[in-house]
Image: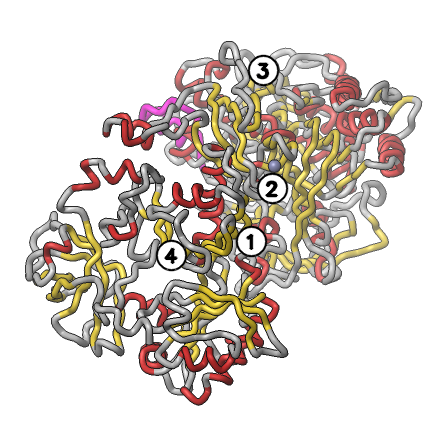
Amino acid sequence: MQLISCPWCGPREEVEFHYGGQAHVAYPDDPAALSDEDWARFVFFRDNPSGPFAERWSHAAGCRRWFNAIRDTRSHELLDVYRMDEAQPARTGTS
Amino acid sequence: MTANFRLPVGGRVNRDEALRFSLDGRPMLGYRGDTLASALLANGVHQVATSIKYGRPRGIMAAGVEDASALVQIEEPFPEPMMSATTVELYDGLIARGLPGQGRLADRPDPARYDAKHVHCDVVVVGAGPAGLVAALTSARSGARVVLVDDQNQAGGALLGSDEYFDDLGSPAAWVHEVLAELRATPGVLVLERTTAFGAYDDGFLLALQRRTDHLGAAAPKDVARQRIWRIRAKQTVIATGAHERPVVFADNDRPGIMLAGAARTYLHRYGVLPGRRIVVFTTNDSAYTAAIELAETGVDVPMLLDARAVPPEGLVAECAARGIEVRAGHAVTGTEGREHITDVHIAPLAGTGHPDTIMCDTLLVSGGWNPVVHLFSQLRGALRYAPELGAFVPGEELPDVQVVGSAAGALDLASCVRQGGEAGRAASEAAGFTRPAPVPLPTSDARVAEAAAMVLWQVPEGAEPTADTRFVDLQRDATVSDVLRATGAGLRSLEHIKRYTTIGTAHDQGKTSGMIAAGIVAEALGVKIAEQRPTTFRPPYTSVPFAALAGRDRGELHDPVRITAMHSWHVAQGALFEDVGQWKRPWYYPRPGEDMADAVLRECRAARESVALMDGSTLGKIDVQGQDSGEFLDMLYTNMMSNLKVGRIRYGVMCGVDGMVIDDGTVIRLAEDRFLVTTTTGNAAKILEWMEEWLQTEWPHLRVFLTSVTEHWATVPLVGPRSRDVLASLAPELDVSNEAFGFMSWRDTVLDVTGGVAARVCRISFSGELAYEINVNAWHGRALWEALMAAGEPYGITPYGTETMHVLRAEKGYPIIGQDTDGTVTPQDLGMSWAVSKKKPDFIGKRSFARSENNRPDRKQLVGLLPANPATVLPEGAQIIESAHLPEPPVRMLGHVTSSYASAALDRGFALAVVRSGRDRIGETLYVPVADDVVPVTVTDSVLFDKEGTRRDG
Ligand SMILES: [Zn+2]
């Protein structure tokens, strides 16, 4: 069982967290202006990289805060965690 | 008559405490400190079981968890299947039976307790052999918090099966005692005996099973947990789990009396037991010479040692000669004789000179080398590397925060083991932030060290393949060399596939002695190098773990939290039957004497429609929404407009996902300009709060909104029926309950005449179509409110009703239950709720999806009512709906399915809700529902079947 570092609470057991999918997929400013295809892309399409991936997590059984994390999808290693109001840390290479 | 193979002195058993036990009805005696296996051997019993496929006698082949054949069923004090005789500590009154492969679970509940404990530490050391002890003590001296885990009842590891002597420090036992005493006296150090680390996971998480009272048998105190799961979280992990000896495969290698050479040393030194009186040794390496020499020194007849190597170690050969042991180099065992016990071994030269021979014996000791116990390392996804000098896999890479030391890393002499232990202990404590541990003096041993390289020999070569193969690779699975060759012959090459094809390594022992040999035989058969083969992955658990231990205290009532309302005790006292909704216990219906469920529900429904009835609605999810931007926030979450709701008013609302599908519904009441209270369905409360938080925190963090779950704060009672106004009026003297003053979809705060005045919020909402009030009070007063309502309603025959009646009443009105009448593919429009979808709002979650072509297909499934042709029919929920009166050949075109179905008192017939393709266009049509062998005709109707005009709402 992994430890996940909540930016607010520190390292906690992974069972305390809920997964929230890809991060930085903003709700469109004006959904009505989007074509059906572009809207469907927002609703249904997400990246699935092999390697570092920015995702959202919620510390559901703790502080109930959402935050972002960079996880290596090959090893599940959490390379970074950062608050919603923080910029995505720059990462070079694929660790 | 019982033979006595116990030496008059020696061993770590307590000869003052004799223990009675039996195997297969045969009573015997052993001592405190014995295992079942050592006590059996002391009584001259080798055969324990018969094999699963061929029924061949099987005995004790090892002295620990690696044993593959000595399986027993324990009958007393409590039935337990599949126990290895080599790991069961003997206790008085133990009754066991040999197992032909499969055990039997107890037919009665286990009275023992099991629990779990968490521990956090800097360094966890697995294994209290020489390497582990030095590692643990070195770390402990640095001030690190150390947990030392060992599966035996005493520390020492391999030293327990040895009579070596430590220079300067005395006997190994004295050294172990000293180390343990210091560890135990060091604050922050935890030593766990009888504790098997069975699973290693991410980030230093280790699971271990502690057997706390198993060794006490029936004398175990009832108030002490029998077994405990330790959940250990360590910054650093040191794996010092030792090595398991590996046999060599030859014909008839499974007879009782054939044993690993190291196991014989353990029985001799730890238990004071001789495995036999006339012992032949067969080895591929130097380690078994010590067994032969030590046994000869006790006076046992050791006529011969067969060394597969052409050139045996000179010094050891000389030691053997001095004790009358003939060493035959370049020889191997080619077969054995005997039925319940070995009587002879057949030997032959592997190459060169010599001739086949037959030697009489009662015990054959075998050593094919040593397999490092790399299980935990492999569980951590550490890559393994084949070490050709060992004929075994060793850790092949560095893992962060993990070290493998001693025999587990392939070291086979004490000096290397303790040196590695010390280095690992220092490195681990430094990595955990502790500096300069005081060094631990390392013991040096007088044990014989290996003189010559070992030979790697998986099996004794055989000329022609025998018809009935008795060259067993996996004794527990009765799998032979021929089975392996059949797998490779069938074209299998991967060890993972061959394991599954042959079942080798899948028994209780998980191939601890057979896995490596199978890999070797496969490589030979395929003509490939083992090093190029991927070993099978070790997965937890390392040894079997009882489900009872894993469950711990989480059984029965503690299995899952139960949520009850403030009125629960009243419902229980009234004989309500309960329905589980999530973790909530909700009254389902309240049967009166002689009533079945159908009777009770019809009666409850009639009361609600004809007079007055009440239910416990406290489980409804309630979320307090506060802050200046609450209206704007709710406008985005609900399909309809909430920001223009006036204080004092209530609105029904629907929530959709971004895909436009309904996820929840409920009421929204406006408490103040900047405060709302929203309700969710009972089962969805937590999910919806998380959904709201997600949008608030991730998309609109600029909104000044705060969300709080207040579900448990309130006791909620819907008071339903034409006489509900009279009942409320009698309890709410300050409230004008007239329709003009207190209209539908509004709320009022008042003080109820309940136990001296209870503040209440009354909402005029209805989930039944009847005049109804939802009364909310502080949960503390829930039961008082309920009893007051029952008393006030008595003149009208007030009737409590449960969830079943609630479902019938709402279904008669066509109100859907989200999650029952919807399944995540249903839009508000499909439900006929376009009226709840705002046209004015520029955006809300789901809005854009309503414009997708898929959401506008005319053949979408829509919510409709169904009336079976026969009014007595109640369709099964989930039944499919078709177009034809006869079930056609498959594939059958399905138009939809029944989502809710009940018998209605108000309609005096059965009715259903259903989602049907183009349902609203089909109103009036006859469709068909296959039910078992029948096809039931049904008429499609509007989803609202009762009081379509809504005349009953205002009373
Ligand atoms: Zn947190």
Disc 3 marks a residue whose amino acid type is: Ala
The answer to whether marks 3 and 2 mark residues whose Cβ atoms lie closer than 8 Å is no
Q: Nearer the viewer, mark 1 or mark 4?
A: 4
Mark pair 2, 1: CA separation: 41 Å
Mark pair 2, 4: CA separation: 32 Å
Disc 1 marks a residue whose amino acid type is: Pro
**Which quadrant of the view contains residue B876?**
bottom left
Would residue B393 be found to the left or right of residue B890 on screen? Answer: right
- First of labels 3, 4 by sequence position: 3
Q: Quadrant of the C terminus of chain B?
A: bottom left
Q: Are marks 2 and 4 on the same chain?
A: no
Q: Chain of mark 2?
A: A
State the residue position of label 1. B81
State the residue position of label 3. B387
Q: Residue at x 41, y 78 (%)?
A: B725
Residue B651 is marked as 4
Disc 4 marks a residue whose amino acid type is: Arg
Q: Chain of mark 3?
A: B
Q: Nearer the viewer, mark 2 or mark 4?
A: 4
**Which quadrant of the view contains residue B763?**
bottom left
Disc 2 marks a residue whose amino acid type is: Gly
Would residue B654 be found to the left or right of residue B69 on screen? Answer: left
Q: Which residues are magenta?
A: B479-495
Q: Nearer the viewer, mark 3 or mark 4?
A: 4
State the residue position of label 2. A62
SS assignment at label 4? strand
Q: Chain of mark 4?
A: B
Q: Is mark 2 within 8 Å of ligand 1?
A: yes
Q: Residues within 10 Å of mark 4 (few under 14, many from 20)?
A: some
- First of labels 3, 1 by sequence position: 1
Mark pair 3, 1: CA separation: 37 Å
